[in-house]
Image (cartoon, helix red, strand yellow):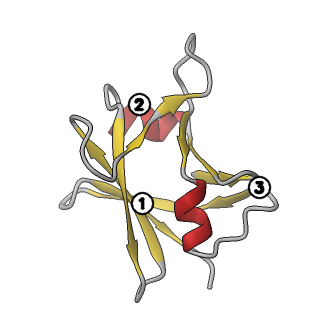
Amino acid sequence: MVTIGSGGVIYLNAFIMRNYYKGINWVVLLHDKIAHSLAIKPCLKEEEGAFRLNFSSLESKSTGVIAARSVIKYLKIDYSKTKQFVSSWNAKERMLEIKLDK
C-alpha cells in the first residue's frame, strides 16, 4: 500500500520497503498520462531528477518516505487529505506502479 499524505509526502509501507527498496536511498518518479499512474523506480545512486528515499523512523526503518510535493502538485493529485493507493510491483521494469484516481 502507498499513501500520499497531506503536504505531498509519499509513504511506502514496511512490506514494500523490505521486499523492493531494501538498501535503496534514491528513487525516480515516473508518470504515465494515459494510464494515469505513478511509478517509483529505485536508483542505486543519486541521479538527475531523483528523490531521496528516507525512513519515517531511523530505528525501525520500516516506512519509506519521499518528499515529492512538487510532483504531486504537478500531477494535480489532491493531497489536502491523506489517501491510500493500491500498488503493484512490475518485476520486468523493476518499479512500483500506483494507479491514481481520475
Name the spot of residue 21 as percent of width and height, x first.
36, 36
Q: Which mark is residue 58?
A: none
* Residue at the disc numbered 3: 82
Which quadrant of the figure has residue 97? bottom left
> Up-down: is 84 above or below 33?
above
Residue ID for mark 2: 18
For residue 38, side relative to residue 93 (left or right): right
Is residue 86 visible in the rendered image? The answer is: no
Query: What kind of element bears circle 1?
Result: strand
Q: Amino acid at mark 2?
A: Arg
For this view, does 30 lie left or right of residue 60?
left
Check disc 1 and report the residue beneath it.
88
Disc 3 residue type (three-letter): Thr
Q: Residue at x 55, y 74 (%)?
A: 75
Gap in angstroms between the C-alphas marked 1 and 3: 20 Å
Amino acid residing under circle 1: Ser
Q: Alpha-carbon neighbours of circle 2 within 10 Å: few (<14), some, or many (≥20)?
A: some
Q: Residue at x 56, y 40 (%)?
A: 13
Residue closer to the observer: 30 or 84: 30
